[in-house]
Amino acid sequence: MEFVCSACGNSFPLDTRLWRCPCGGYFNIRDPKPYSPFKVRWQTLSLWRYREMLPDVGEIVSMGEGMTPIVEAEWKGMRVYFKLEYLSPTGSFKDRGTTVLVSFLKGIGVKEVVEDSSGNAGASLAAYAARAGIKARIFVPAHASPAKKAQIAIYGAELVEVEGPREEAAKAAREEAEKGYYYASHYYNPLILEGMKTVAYEIYDQLGKLPHAIVLPVGHGTLLLGLYQGFQEILKAISIRIPALYGVQAKNCSPLFEAFHSGIEKIDEYAPKPTVAEGVSIARPLRAKEILQAVKKSKGRILAVEEEEILKAHKELAQKGFFVEPTSAVAVAALDQLTHLSGKRVLVILTGSGLKSLA
Ligand SMILES: [Zn+2]
């Protein structure tokens, strides 16, 4: 297993301190470990039950992430499975990727990391870094939710607020990375995707069958790519039909939606408008081409929803007992566009806790 550059094909060891190839391409993983149902450690009640399918790490830095419940509910006449990723240790699905990355970093002796985040990935990294004894500096847009910023700070990470759009926080983190700090980016580092793929394994194990469709919010698309990779790996071991993946964006920031419907695969320029779905307010998703290809190959689609639809779904979800952040409601709001799936097994991933979006 090694890193491979997505642009030039050069390979690098997993313990490289580089965060991307000198040619500018981002890294993917070459030769991930294969999925095998016989290698699942059933008695482990976290995603580390799939350890044999994950990169080798020394000591596991875990807080019991993964194994989130799947709860059935009715949504406007549809039966829907909700996967409650918001019950993860730091309140979002990001913990799946972070546990793998931080375990690996501890094993190779990394002492200090930097990261940029709209909030959830930063909070997740801050928590796992604290547990691992690694110092973390997190760059967040100044306009991020106060609750998310407070969460990052309370874990003991250094919180650096950056004025301007999300991209400014990314720039600030990368400048630090150039000085030699490990850039523990939740979208650049493909070890994050290794953790994300476990959600596919878990859905399969929990339901004992696969849904026909999975609906989820998409920003940088790490969860969607993890799902697709996980299902691909299951498919190599068992004959399954991969669920159609429906990635949903807020219309106000929907570069993938526009690219999907215009048939282009590269997003150079996109001018976003503000959205309540801050977690998916990503104007230039790093792995756009891979996301679009995964969606197409799974026979799914990229959808977009208006702000008022997001807020309405957010409230209606809470009235069914699911208190999530507005970013998670994006996926639920899109169900109105998927009525053709009525009667099919539809699973929606609820990604982040509502407690994170309280002012
Ligand atoms: Zn390269």
Image (tube, grey):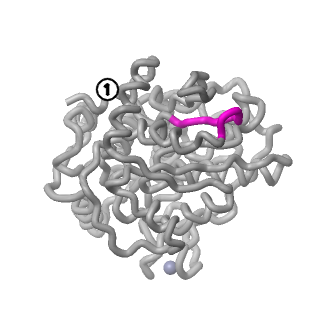
Report the residue marked by disc 1. Answer: 355
Q: Element type at marker 1? A: helix
Look at the picture and state if 205 lies above or below 180: above
Q: Is residue 103 visible?
A: no
Residue at horizontal 31%, vertical 46%? 278
Residue at horizontal 30%, vertical 48%? 118
Assess disc 1: are there few (<14), some (14-19) or many (≥20) residues with their C-alpha within 10 Å of its C-alpha.
some
Task: Name the quadrant containing residue 272.
Answer: bottom left
Q: Position of residue 215 (x, y in %)?
A: 56, 43
Residue at horizontal 38%, vertical 40%? 327
Q: Position of residue 1 (x, y in %)?
A: 65, 61
Magenta stretch: includes residue 107: no
Image quadrant where one finds the C terminus: top left
Task: Name the quadrant containing residue 253.
Answer: bottom left
Magenta stretch: includes residue 346: yes
290 or 178, which is in the foreground?
A: 290
Residue at horizontal 33%, vertical 53%? 281
Q: Which residues are magenta?
A: 341-349
Look at the picture and state if 225 lies above or below 336: below
Furthest residue to the right?
Answer: 239
Q: Position of residue 53 (x, y in %)?
A: 69, 46
Q: Position of residue 70 (x, y in %)?
A: 60, 26
Look at the picture and state if 45 lies above or below 168: above
100 or 326, which is in the foreground?
A: 326
Residue 308 left/right relative to 83: left
Three-letter amino acid code at disc 1?
A: Leu
Query: Ligand 1 near label 1 (Cβ, under 8 Å)?
Result: no
